[in-house]
Amino acid sequence: MKKTMKHLGAFALIMTLALGLIGCGSSQEDVKTIRIGHKNFTEQRIVGQLYAVMVENHSDYETKVTEFGGSQLVLEALKSDEIDLYGDYTGTLYATVLKESGETDTEKVYTMVKDHMQADPYKFEVLGSLGFNNTYTLSVPQEIAEQYNLETISDLAAIGPELRLGGFNEFMERPDGLPGVKEVYGVSFKSEKSLDAGIRYTAIENGDTDVIDAFSTDGKILQYDLKVLKDDKNFFPPYYIVTLLGGNVSTEIPEVTAAINMLEGQISDEEMQQMNFLVDEKGMPERKVAEDFLKEKGLIE
């Protein structure tokens, strides 16, 4: 009897180990889940859900969406195969990964980023831009734009000395922020004050400042009905969002790549701005905003 039990115990152990090895060897295709990463702010959360909805509607895969603290963390997660894909900005990758600066041509920055990220040590597939450019802008209240007939940053050169600028601390100091704007556009202001990010909008609403820096897809531009001045000399770096695929996703799971590729060029600055507004100011869930947008575009049913 003891001998029989001993054999049964050995058999059970062998089966357990075998099942464990099978589990460890399971591919992403076996578990039918695509792991999507994003950074920790509204726009990135929406983009993560846009990816998830597209994958779920145009393939047999489920998705798992995970938030990371910033570019370096989510990039490392992709590199170490913790996630399968995420979206990042060309300007961010250009500055933080390539350690480059000075180039503002959209196509050149994209090509440099793509070539670098597809080579060692990353070997990621870099897809095309989703369409919108979340770059710096200078914005003014509509009444000031109308009063001075402002359309571009160049238009500020003549009347800048009459206006007060309130800018985010980082923008006031970075070469690709205010110092560069002043050099390239020859503009100066009546006063210049560093403000926390959220306070900028309160200050302009209260009439404490006349011009602020902002990001072009910020939902608060809509909330406060601001006029975005065109960067007519293309000074600010391009921040177009592109999709990075890790491992062999593009070759082994072509239907997922095809689903993501359907988003290429589909989202304008204004549309991304509206989605951010719906989440930040109207309290709508990111998933709902993503689904509604994709249905409106005819990308899902």
Image (spheres, grey):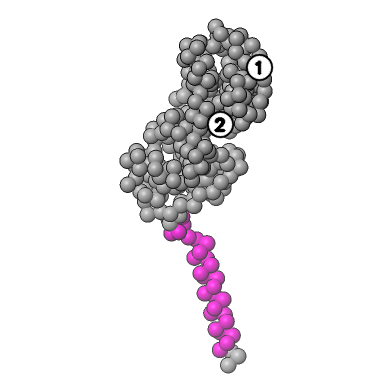
Residue at numbered disc 1 = 192
Q: Is residue 199 magenta?
A: no
How far is disc 2 from disc 1 in space, using C-alphas? 26 Å
Residue at the image point whose x is 47% and y is 38% from the top? 278
The N terminus lies in quadrant? bottom right
54 left or right of 201 in image? left
Does 99 sit above or below residue 178?
Answer: below
Q: Counting residues from the N terminus, which is met first, the one under dot 2 or under dot 1? A: 2
Residue 162 in the image, given as x and y percentages of width and height:
60, 9
Residue 187 in the image, given as x and y percentages of width and height:
58, 10
Q: Nearer the viewer, mark 2 or mark 1?
A: 1
Task: Inspect the image, locate mark 2, and give the three-letter code of the amino acid beneath it.
Answer: Thr
What numbered label is drawn on residue 251? Answer: none
Which residue range is magenta in the image?
4-31
Does 187 sit above or below residue 27?
Answer: above
Residue at the image point whose x is 57% and y is 87% from the top? 5
Task: Inspect the image, locate mark 1, and give the three-letter code of the amino acid beneath it.
Answer: Glu
Regarding residue 202, the answer to whether it shows in the image is yes
Residue at the image point whose x is 54% and y is 49% from the top? 66
210 left or right of 242 in image? right
Q: Secondary structure at mark 2?
A: helix
Q: Is residue 25 magenta?
A: yes
Residue at numbered disc 2 = 92
Residue 8 in the image, given as x and y percentages of width and height:
55, 84
Most foreground residue, 78 or 13: 78
Q: Secondary structure at mark 1?
A: strand
267 left or right of 186 in image? left
